[in-house]
Amino acid sequence: MREFFLTEYSNYGSQQPEMETQLIFDTVNDHYLLLRTGWDDTRRVHCCIFHFDIKDGKIWVQENNTDLEIDEDLEEMGISKKEIVVGFHHPSMRQYSKYAVS
């Protein structure tokens, strides 16, 4: 299910022949990434679109470089707010979100 979730987003954004989408699944250590690499004309692109970790049974959203509300998508899959940590928010600010702090 973890892999399927990121695979659904692998076509997000512009599709250019000079760009490659990479799905990285480290199921042993529970790290999951969606990367985009390649060239935009003469500019090198190496961008992490999404980065998720699973720590202590919670999904940590470590990076979201999209305008998608990925945490809401996780909720729609049946994952409770108590099981989602927005890891790219500073720890002191997480208490103000509707999600878990750690």
Image (spheres, rainbow, N blue to C red):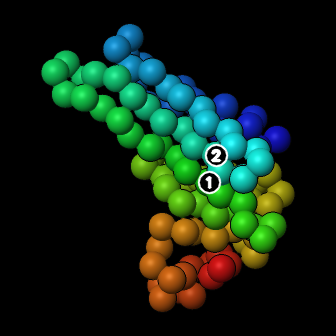
Marks 2 and 1 sit apart, C-alpha to C-alpha, by 5 Å
The residue positioned farthest toward the left in the image shown: 42
Q: Residue at x 75, y 35 (%)?
A: 4
Where does residue 74 sit, x and y in percent of width and height? 71, 55
Frontmost residue, 87 versus 69: 87
The residue positioned farthest toward the front in the image shown: 28
Element marked by disc 2 = strand
The answer to the question of whether label 2 and label 1 lie on touching residues, with beta carbons closer than 8 A, is: yes
Task: Please determine whether, in this image, residue 68 is positioned above or below residue 97.
Answer: above
Q: In which quarter of the image is the C terminus?
A: bottom right
Where does residue 50 sit, x and y in percent of width and height? 53, 47
Mark drawn on residue 52: 1
Mark 2 — residue?
32
Task: Please determine whether, in this image, residue 33 is positioned above or below residue 10.
Answer: below
Crowd rating for badge 2 (residues with CA inside 10 Å; few <14, some 14–19, many 20+): many
Q: In which quarter of the image is the N terminus?
A: top right
Q: Residue at x 49, y 56 (%)?
A: 63
Where does residue 75 sit, x and y in percent of width and height? 74, 59
**Of the image marks 2 and 1, the number of the one nearer the N terminus:** 2
Q: Residue at x 63, y 82 (%)?
A: 101
The amino acid type of the residue labelled 2 equals: Tyr
Q: Which residue is drawn at 34% across and 14% down?
A: 18
Name the quadrant containing residue 57: bottom right
The answer to whether residue 66 of the structure is visible from this angle is yes
